[in-house]
Each structure stands twice: as C-alpha cells, then as structure tokens.
Amino acid sequence: MISPSLPGGTFSASKFIISDILNAECAYIKESRGAPVGNAINAGVGVGIFKDYRIIKDWLKVTDEIKPNPERHKFYNKIYQIYRQLYPALKKHYKKLAKVTGYT
C-alpha cells in the first residue's frame, strides 16, 4: 500500500486514477503532516525498523483506502505504451515548450 500526497480537498477521481495507474492500493490521510513523516516511514521500512507500510495506519488517520481497478489499469497501461512510442519524436518539442513557458 502506498500513501500519495495530494492537496487538501483533492477531487476524489484523482485518487482512483492514481491507484489505477500505479496498480496499487492507496491510503489517504486526513491531514498531511508533510514530507518529513513520509520520509521517516520510508527510511524505517528501508532499514527494517518497520516491517512494511502498514505503520501508516498507526501513525496517521487514514480517511480513504482505494483499491486499483484491473480493467482501468490495463487501459492506462495501453495509453502509456503509446506515449512511450511517441516520446522520442516529441522530446525536442517538449524542450521548445519548456523554453517558451519558462518550465525548464
């Protein structure tokens, strides 16, 4: 299970989209305590202090748990495969867009 960080009041459809794209259960918390808590949990799991990410439920108030939809995951994966084929041809155009918009 993962716990993506989304801004407060985030439209609920985005929660399902994230779960479906990643093909992973996602837990959402009521109040985000920011990156430091997430970093601590990641580090704890990484070095073996915590067995897995279920510690999130002990540390934080989970408000939503979203399970992925296998059919939607397949759909998003098909789109991603097409994007991967298109990206090499579009890469130079992305650089131009970044220059024009200032997003470098």
Image (spheres, helix red, strand yellow):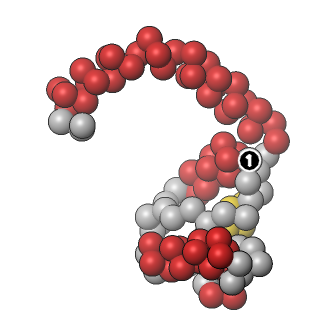
Residue 81 coordinates in the image, percent (x, y): 65, 23
The residue at 59%/71% (across/down) is 42
Outermost residue, bottom side: 58
The residue at 28%/24% (across/down) is 95
Image quadrant where residue 29 sits: bottom right
User: Which secondary structure, mark 1?
Assistant: loop
Q: Is residue 80 above or below residue 72?
A: above
Amino acid type, residue under disc 1 in the picture: Asn
The residue at 62%/50% (across/down) is 18
Q: Nearer the viewer, residue 4 or 46?
A: 46
Residue 48 relative to residue 95: left or right: right
Image quadrant where residue 4 sits: bottom right
Residue 66 coordinates in the image, percent (x, y): 72, 60
Bin the neighbour count of mark 1 within 10 Å (Cα to Cα): few under 14, some 14-19, many 20 and up.
some
Residue tagged 1: 23
Residue 51 relative to residue 35: left or right: right
Residue 26 coordinates in the image, percent (x, y): 68, 62
Q: Is residue 67 above or below residue 21?
A: below
Q: Is residue 43 above or below residue 6?
A: below
Outermost residue, top side: 89
Q: Nearer the viewer, residue 21 or 53?
A: 53
Q: Is residue 54 visible?
A: no
Q: Nearer the viewer, residue 6 or 55?
A: 55
Residue 45 coordinates in the image, percent (x, y): 67, 74
Classify the position of the C terminus by image quarter: top left
Image quadrant where residue 50 sits: bottom right
Residue 19 relative to residue 91: left or right: right
The residue at 67%/33% (across/down) is 76
